[in-house]
Amino acid sequence: MKIQAPYLLFLGDASDELSIKMAKGVADWRPELCIGEYTLEGCLVTTGQPSMNIAAAKAAGAKTFVLSFANSGGTIDPSWVPYIIEALENDMHVVSGLHQKLTDIPQVKALAEQRGLDLIDIRHPTQTFKTGNGQKRTGKRLITVGTDCSVGKMYSSLCLEKGMKARGVNVDFRASGQCGILIAGDGVAIDCVVADFIAGASELISPDNADDHWDIIEGQGSLSHPAFAGVSLGLLHGAQPDAIVICHALNRTSMRGIKNKPLPTIEQTIALNLAAAQVTNPNAKIAGVTVNTSSVDEQQAIDICRQIAQQVGYPCVDPVRHGVEPILENIL
Amino acid sequence: MKIQAPYLLFLGDASDELSIKMAKGVADWRPELCIGEYTLEGCLVTTGQPSMNIAAAKAAGAKTFVLSFANSGGTIDPSWVPYIIEALENDMHVVSGLHQKLTDIPQVKALAEQRGLDLIDIRHPTQTFKTGNGQKRTGKRLITVGTDCSVGKMYSSLCLEKGMKARGVNVDFRASGQCGILIAGDGVAIDCVVADFIAGASELISPDNADDHWDIIEGQGSLSHPAFAGVSLGLLHGAQPDAIVICHALNRTSMRGIKNKPLPTIEQTIALNLAAAQVTNPNAKIAGVTVNTSSVDEQQAIDICRQIAQQVGYPCVDPVRHGVEPILENIL
C-alpha cells in the first residue's frame, strides 16, 4: 500500500527533537512529499516545514495526515482523536507510526470506511507474507548493517541512494522501518512481522528488477545485538545483498538499551555479516564503512575515517559530512 | 498458561503419520499426560493410545481436548466444530496447533467463555513480550541447534532431559514449538511471536533458576536456513546457552523447503552457533552432536557417528538408537 503524498506532518505537542525523528526524516529527505506541519499548543519543536492547520493543508492539496511523532508507550492520546477525525472529514488518509492502532479506534475506523479513506498503521503490517524461498532475484542489492542499533543505517542508505542517483544509476531506497516507510512511501516494518516471515518479508521488500538496477535496503538492528539480531539476520538473508555497508557510531559505551554490553569491533561486524550474507548470496562483498562522527569535530572526523579505512581495508566516510563517493567508487 | 492434563488427542480423519506428529510426540514422550485418542471415520493412523469418544474420555478424567494433527493450510474444518463443541460441553479446555484460531469461531468462543474454559491456540501466543535485555540469568542451559530444520532437535532435547533425569539432575525441557509445548504443558511457539520480541520471548522460556538446574531448550530452524535463521538466532541469543548440541540428519540433498541449497557442514554449524551464542554467553561451549540415522542400518549408524566424532572432536550419537551418555559425560 503506497502512502499518498503530499503529507501534513502532525507533531501533536511533541517537546523534544528525538520524538519527531520520523517527521524530521521525511522533511529532511523528501521535502517534496511534505506540504507542512501541524502542531498543537505546547509543541516545542519543528521540522522546518511551514506550519498550517488541517483546512489550510487540505486547500494546499494534502492527501495524507501523518502522526509522525513518538511518545512513551506508543498510545494515541484521546485528545488527538478530534484532529484525526478532522483530517478524515477533509478527505485525507491517515498514517500512524505509533504502537496503538488507528483501526482500533471505532469512531476513526467507521469514518474512514464510510469515506473510503485508508488508515495505515505502519507498525502493524497487514500484508500476508510467505516464508522465504531463498531463490536468487534479478537486479543488484546493497544493505546497510550496524555495529549496533541506531547508528545511522537509514541516513547512510539515503546518502547512498542520493549519490547513486547523482551518477545516473537506476536506484531505489527500500524501507524496513517506520521512518523509512514514510520516506519511501512504502516498505515493511520488518521488526513488526511474525518471526516465521522475517526473511520472506525481506524478499518482498526488494523484488526482481532490471540487471543494472540497485536497491538500497535499509538495515535494522545488529547481528551482535542481544535483543534484535534475529530481525537483522532474517532481513539480511532475504535481502541477498551484493554489497554490504557497515554503519558505526562513535563513543558508545554499551549496545543500545543493553547494560554492560560492549560493541563489537568493525572487523567483527564485517566478518559476521559477510558470513551470514553468503548464505543467500555467495558473492556478497563489503563495500565500505560509514561512521556517524557527529560527536567529534571536523578534523577528528576525517582522521577517524582515515584510520578505520586503513585498519579494515575498505573505504570509510561519514556520509552526512563527507558524502559517499569512495564507497560508490568501490561498488560501481 | 499451563495446558491441563490429561489430554484427549483428537486426530480427526488424519491419514498419514506426518500429520499426527504433534499427537505422536506427546504420546511417545508423555504417555502419562494422555488419556486416549479420538478418531473420525477415515482416520488411518494411531498414536497407540486407547481409542475413546469424548464422553468416555470425560468419564476417565480428561481435562483438555487437543486438535493434535496438521492439515494443509492449517484451517479448522467446519465438520470438526461439533466435536469441539461437544468437548466444551463436557467441560474440557481445548488446545489447537492449527493456524486458524479457535477463538475466531464465534460459536466456540462464546461457549468457552460461558463455561469458563480455556481455548489455547498454540500458534498464536497471547502473552505480552518484552524485547530482550541480554542480562545473564542464573542456572544452566543447553540448547539444541540444527544443520537444517526438522533434523531432530526436539527428540534430541527430550533424550537429553531423560538422560539427565536418570542421573538425578534437576532438569526441565523447555519448549519453543507447538509439539514441544504440548509435551511440556507450556512454552512459546517462538516462530509465531513478533520479530522484535524473539529474543525477549526466548529469555522468558528459561527464567532464572537454581545454580545446579539445567534447562534443555528446544531449538528451532537453523542459522544456515534462508527462511528461518532469524528465529534460530533470536532464540539462541535469548537462551544464553552454556552448552550447545548440534543436530543433524543424514541424506538431505537440500535445505528443507529450499531448492538447490546444500546443507552446511557440521563444522560450519558448530562455528556459526558458537560465535552467535557467545554474544550473550561468552562461556558457551559445544557439548556434542546428535544424528538422525534412521535412513541407514545399525552398523552404518555406529560407523557414521564414530566418524563424525573423530572429525569434529565432540561426542556424536543417534540419541534414539544409542542414548546420549557420551554427551552427558561431556557436560556434567
Image (spheres, coloured by chain):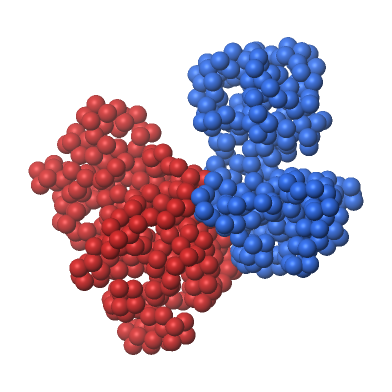
Chain colours: A blue, B red
Nearer the observer, A255 or A47: A255
Position of A163 compared to B216: left or right? right
Residue A69 locus on image (x, y percent):
64, 29
Near-viewer residue (A207 or A40)? A40
* Residue plotted at (78% across, 67% down): A310
Q: How many marks?
A: 0
The residue sitting at the right extreme is A167
Q: Is residue B312 above or below residue A6?
A: below
Q: Quadrant of the N terminus of chain A?
A: top right
Q: Quadrant of residue B299?
A: bottom left
Q: Can you give x and y, in whole percent of width and height, for residue B225 in the image?
A: 53, 63
Residue at left offset 34%, top offset 68%:
B156
Task: Report the side of B224 relative to A92 (left or right).
Answer: left
Q: Examine the rendered structure and indicate whether residue A270 appears above or below residue B3.
A: below
**Residue closest to the eye, B159 or B13:** B159
Residue B47 drawn at (x, y percent): 23, 59
